[in-house]
Amino acid sequence: MTPRLCARRRAQLASTHVTTVRVNASDAVSVQTAALIVGVHTTPDGLQAAPGAEGLDQALGGRLAETLGAVGFTGKAGELTKIPTFGALPAPVLVAVGLGDRPEGDYDLETLRRAAGVAARSLAGTADAAIALPAATAEQVEAIALGGLLGAYDFSKYRTNGDRKPPVGELVILSGSSEADEAVRRAVTVAESVNLVRDLVNTPPSDLWPARFAEIAQEKGEAAGLSVEVLDEVALKEGGYGGIIGVGQGSANPPRLVRLAYHHPDAARTIAFVGKGITFDSGGLSLKPTSSMNWMKSDMGGAGAVLGAMIAISRLRLPINAIGYLCLAENMPSGTAQRPSDILRTYSGKTVEVVDTDAEGRLVLVDGIARAAEDGPDLIVDVATLTGAQIVALGWRTAGVMANDDALRDEVVEVAARQGEAAWGMPLPEELRKGLDSPVADIANLQPERWGSMLAAGIFLREFVPEGVRWAHVDMAGPAFNKGEPYGYTPKGGTGAITRTLIGLAERYAGNGASAGAV
């Protein structure tokens, strides 16, 4: 059983995100609010208010473009400025956010998400704000609501000096769509899941060790209607989960494996997710340098994404069976830690020579993948902050996607794009497999050369996927944690990356592919 924590620590870990969102059919020039958010396009004739802000220029005496131009606003996508309305509108402050060129067809949903996100983030400390962005359809309303809620995210639970303003209290989306309320409900469900993942990634490892992560997963999962099973270190040893045990044996905080399950009576398909959950990665005895270690609290982002997605799938009542595995361990150096040259017997029965203890994520994942295959899913997707090579190859914002089926790889990339999560399909070159040969075990956990390391890690994982099982691997080492400044609806720190992609995949396999781009 997981030990219970004191009430003080539980309160400390409680979320502080309190922004709410609702729909109002009022028009932009009459709505009562502390701030009014409008979209602005660049056109051959100059700046122009986007749909949703009809009548605004007239209310401002025909001087909207002139005023915005005077403060240097260009209308570039994501650009933002604030101007006073001097009583011309009920809202004392006008927040103009750039949408770029006006599209000839439908609005790009990601443009709307980012516009709402950057505007919401700029209004910290404001009681409420009305959003008059293009919101004629349910998909547009959902994109705006989701972007606004994600943009308003703030992680301040450990600050005691009160120097940060709270997030905007309420966002009011101006829309006459008959489906707007349902669209907002869906957006709130997804945003709560993504922001939960962000909270987990941002939480210091002193407050998020494997057993605590498992306890949170059980609390949140059961509250959402999931069935939850937690295997502790004794059950893991008895069950033959040698990869998870090997990685976690050097820590005073023993490992866990969490199984989350959702079943729908009308489901025709089953999808399984496996998440890497290294609550802190020191590198083990193959110790990381300080510069690479100081953000390794984010190394559980894959497991976080799986937990967040499973909660959303259950709350949305998608007609699919979904199973999630959280492979949780803390990778630490000690007298009991695994050593380079140790050989592990994994859950699949295959043996692995540990060449480098810092290549630990793949060791916990293969146990999760092999266990997930026993559930007979139509698809397994593993999600992991797996390799620094992903950042070298694709940068901080784009995840790498590999699969044992090219069509599946492309499908995952497509779904990610529809959610606004950047991903790029990568190959699994057969010539890299030889570099994983071991003279003493079935396979080594690392190839001797650095080149193609992200791809070689994918090849390693593929070796543990049973024949005939469709499998995809998402390496999101960079996208899971934003070390730079906030942008769009993405904050500094934990991002909640790939959570929405997993939800979108579940929707597609549930037969709701047409709505998958709306979350």
Image: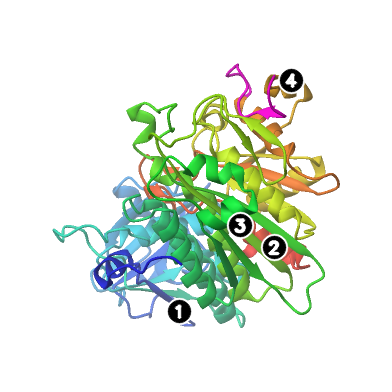
What quarter of the picture does the C terminus occupy? bottom right
**Local crowd at mark 1 within 10 Å, few (<14), some, or many (≥20)?**
some
> From what the image shows, is residue 22 above or below residue 367?
below
Residue 22's mark? 1
Q: Which of 202 and 151 is in front in this view?
A: 202
Quadrant in which residue 336 is drawn: top left
Q: Where is residue 474 in the image (x, y as percent from the top left)?
A: 63, 43
Q: Which of marks 4 and 1 is nearer the N terminus?
A: 1
Q: Which amino acid does label 3 sit on?
A: Tyr
Q: What element carries label 1?
A: strand
- Residue at 45% over, 79% down: 22
Residue 506, disc: 2
Give the SS element for disc 2. Answer: helix
Whole-number angstrom distance, CA of label 3 to CA of label 1: 34 Å
Amino acid type shown at disc 2:
Ala
* Position of residue 456 in the picture relative to residue 54 (left or right): right
**Pointers 2 and 4 in contact (C-beta within 8 Å):** no
Mark 4 Cα-neighbour bin, 10 Å: few <14, some 14–19, many ≥20:
few
- The reply to whether the C-beta atoms of the residues labelled 2 and 3 are less than 8 Å apart is no
The amino acid marked with disc number 1 is Arg
Question: Considering depth in this image, is 18 or 514 the residue closer to the camera?
Answer: 18
The earlier-in-sequence mark between 2 and 1 is: 1
Q: How far apart are marks 2 and 4 (CA)?
A: 35 Å
Q: Residues within 10 Å of mark 3 (few under 14, many from 20)?
A: many
* Range shown magenta: 439-452
Q: Is residue 302 left or right of residue 468?
A: left
Q: Which of 137 and 377 is in front in this view?
A: 377
Q: Residue 325 carries which label?
A: 3
Position of residue 229 relative to residue 155, above or below, is: below
Q: Is the magenta stretch mostly helix, strand or loop?
A: loop
Q: Name the residue under label 4.
A: 434
* Secondary structure of residue under mark 4: helix
